[in-house]
Image (tube, rainbow, N blue to C red):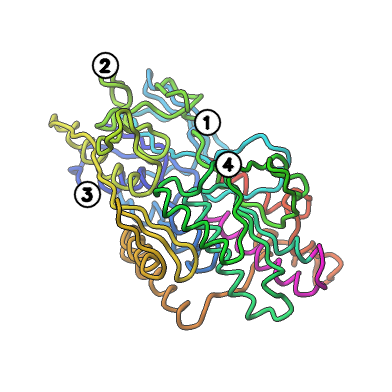
Amino acid sequence: MRILIIGGGYAGFYTAWRLEKRLRPGEAEVTVVDPRGYMTYQPFLPEVTAGSVEARHVIVSLRSHLRTTRIIAGHAVAVDHAHRSATVRTNAGSVQSIGYDMLVITAGAVTRRLPIPGVAEEAIGLKQVEEAVAIRDRLLAAFDEAAALPPGPERTRLLTVTVVGGGFTGVETFGELLSLATSLLRSYPEITFPDLSFHLVEAQARILPEVTDGPGRWVVRHLEQRGAHVHTEARVTSARGGHIELSTGETFDTNLLIWSAGNGSNPVIAQHTDLPVDDRGLLRVRADLRVGTDEAPVPDAWAAGDNAAVPDLAATAPGALTVPNAQHAVRQGKHLAANLVAHLRGKTVRPYVHHSLGTVATLGMGKGIFQYRRLVIRGPLAWLMHRGYHVLAIPTWERKLRVLLVWISAVLFGRDIVALPGVERPRAAFLAAGDPDMLPPSRGHIGSGTDAGARELIGAGHAR
């Protein structure tokens, strides 16, 4: 039995990990196709942007933890399930056809990018760790540059950060970056708090739809009390050259534009397979995580994670789907592995049911919010709950320990505030040979031609 898993994110990694523990020797061969070769623990990406977590500590190597699984570094570009074949383009550029007996799709979603002028050239997403590192380095480099300038429009532009999207990722990233920028003022006496300008833009009437109205309004007030600008019922209509224009008529220049305006379906899954998808491009999935419907199941095809429309049996609303978050993806991966083994052995598979453990978000160092039904906790306790939950949720004890050690060192010695913008252009110093006139600018607009490395990071962030 050949099992092919497309995607090595939460659901894919946990499916393969559990299969290795449950399968008998020789019972099945498991292959995982993923371009990166590691799982990214995305809930920690906002803290990576703020330097609260080390970038490499939020990723888990597939090869280090999947001992008997075959790993193929590449992209699945098409699936012909009728003939049990997937076309894969490896990272080296070769194209190969992989046969399988059973298919598991856990490719995940991509950042939803809208056709707004300037967004493709200026914005950075937040799906991958490379994007989080680039965001952190650009903010730190902007402080270095702004400290050498007199007060004025250019300094203001350098210290203006705009986050588009008021969901959990956007709000957590916004709060963490605001916390980082505020703490940096101690190290930059040339810069004062009024020089900072932080904008959160959300198209809906409220932020954080995952919590109820009261806590959502509290988060807005909390951010505004910290000096932030929260624009609700506002859309970005243009971002050309870093000049932001909103549908409300407001305009301002920004140095850093972060795009977290929701998820979009994976285009390969939505357009290049013969599997059933809904009107949003998500795979139609039954409650037991088999692809298809109760009336028309697709044999030997399973799916989970952000790119699967999984029925939420724990919800009271009819037709509800599980929300695309780590809490569900991890549990779906584990459940999918158990169902695959049960199916292979002719046993009964079980429907996926998970009752929410509540929602928790960090809003910066020592600040957070938690809600479970009517229970709402705000402030330092919620922040500690956020850290406690996610350090327990990140896989492997080795990663848990590394994250804890970084947090302890940050408490004792503060955040590391060194930027490494040269990582985006690793050959620049070698080619310049010490001549400062030959060195490229330390930063610049992503679309300006001086920041090709950062532009490549954007492309990597939308790879799957």
Which of marks 2 and 4 precedes in the sequence?
4
**Residue at position x 34%, y 38% in the image:** 322
Comparing 445 with 244, the one in front is: 244
**Residue at position x 79%, y 62% in the image:** 440
The amino acid on which the numbered mark 2 sits, given as a three-letter code, is Glu
The amino acid on which the numbered mark 4 sits, given as a three-letter code, is Ala
Q: Nearer the viewer, mark 3 or mark 4?
A: 4
**Residue at position x 28%, y 32% in the image:** 289
Which of marks 1 and 2 precedes in the sequence?
1
Labelled disc at residue 267:
1
**Residue 132, percent from left and from top:** 56, 57
Local crowd at mark 3 within 10 Å, few (<14), some, or many (≥20)? Answer: few
Which of marks 4 and 1 precedes in the sequence?
4
**C-alpha distance separating marks 3 and 4:** 45 Å
**C-alpha distance separating marks 1 and 4:** 24 Å
Would you say 224 lies left or right of 159 here?
left
